[in-house]
Amino acid sequence: MSIDVLNETEVEVDLDEVHEVARYAMDEMHVHPQADLAIRVIDEAAMEVLHVQWMDLPGPTDVMSFPMDELRPGRAGEPSEEGVLGDIVLCPTVAARQAAEAGHTTQEELLLLTVHGVLHLLGFDHAESQERQEMFDLQRTLLLTFLARRGSDARITPPSGKE
C-alpha cells in the first residue's frame, strides 16, 4: 500500500501519524494492499480555490476527497480491487478552529478528517440521514480503535456529524 503524505504549509503536522491512521482505516476497510493514496496538507488559500472549483462553495473547508478509481471496501479475505484510491486534502488551520470548538487538539482533528476522507474515497457519504449515521458511526469506530491501539490518551470526541 502506497500512502504519500505531503505538508505544503508552515503548520506543524505529525505526518507519520496521519499516514498511520490512513493505513489503519484502509486496512480495516480491506482496501487492496497495492492501492495508492495521496494526502496533501495545504493552506486556506489553496483549499478555498479547490472548494470553489469542485464544490462551488465559498471559503476554505477542512477536508476534501478526490476519488480516482472508485474503489469500494472489500471484506475479510476479499480485498477491494487494486488501484488508486485517490487524494485527500487537509487544511490544518480550519482543522485547528474546529478542534478548539470541539475541545481536542489540531492533530486529533486532522486524524478524524483523514478517516473521514478515506471513507469518502471508498464511496461513503453523508448527504442523507441514513448514510450520515452509517458513515459517522464507522468513522467514530475507526478513529477510536486506532487511538486505543496506539494507547493514546487523546481527548477526541468525534462529532455526531462531520460536514
Image (spheres, grey):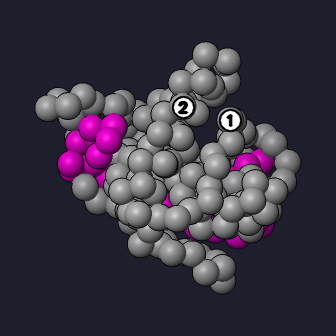
The residue lying toward the viewer, choosing from 39 and 20, is 20
Circle 2 sits in a helix, a strand or a loop, which is it? helix
Q: Residues within 10 Å of mark 2 (few under 14, many from 20)?
A: some
The quadrant holding residue 41 is bottom right
Which quarter of the image is occupied by the C terminus? top right
* 45 drawn magenta: yes
Amino acid under disc 1: Ser
Mark before the other along the chain sequence, 1 or 2:
2
The residue lying toward the viewer, choosing from 54 and 24, is 24
Query: Does residue 4 appear left or right of residue 132 in this picture?
Result: left
The residue lying toward the viewer, choosing from 143 and 19, is 143
In the image, residue 10 sits, relative to residue 2, either above or below, namely below
Residue at numbered disc 2? 137
Q: Residue at x 21, y 48 (%)?
A: 33
Contact, mark 1 vs mark 2 (Cβ under 8 Å): no
Q: Residues within 10 Å of mark 1 (few under 14, many from 20)?
A: few
In the rendered picture of this protein, how many numbered marks are placed on residues?
2
Query: Does residue 136 appear left or right of residue 79 in this picture?
Result: right
Residue at far left of view: 77
Residue span colored magenta: 27-52
For the question of whether residue 25 can be seen, the reply is yes
Give the percent coordinates (x, y) of residue 120: 52, 37
* 133 drawn magenta: no
Using the image, tell me which numbered label, if any, was put on residue 160. Answer: 1
Q: Residue at x 51, y 75 (%)?
A: 14
Amino acid under disc 2: Asp
Q: Residue at x 41, y 72 (%)?
A: 16
- Distance between the Cα atoms at labels 1 and 2? 8 Å
Give the percent coordinates (x, y) of residue 99: 73, 60
Give the percent coordinates (x, y) of residue 138: 48, 34
Circle 1 sits in a helix, a strand or a loop, which is it? loop
The residue lying toward the viewer, choosing from 19 and 151, is 151
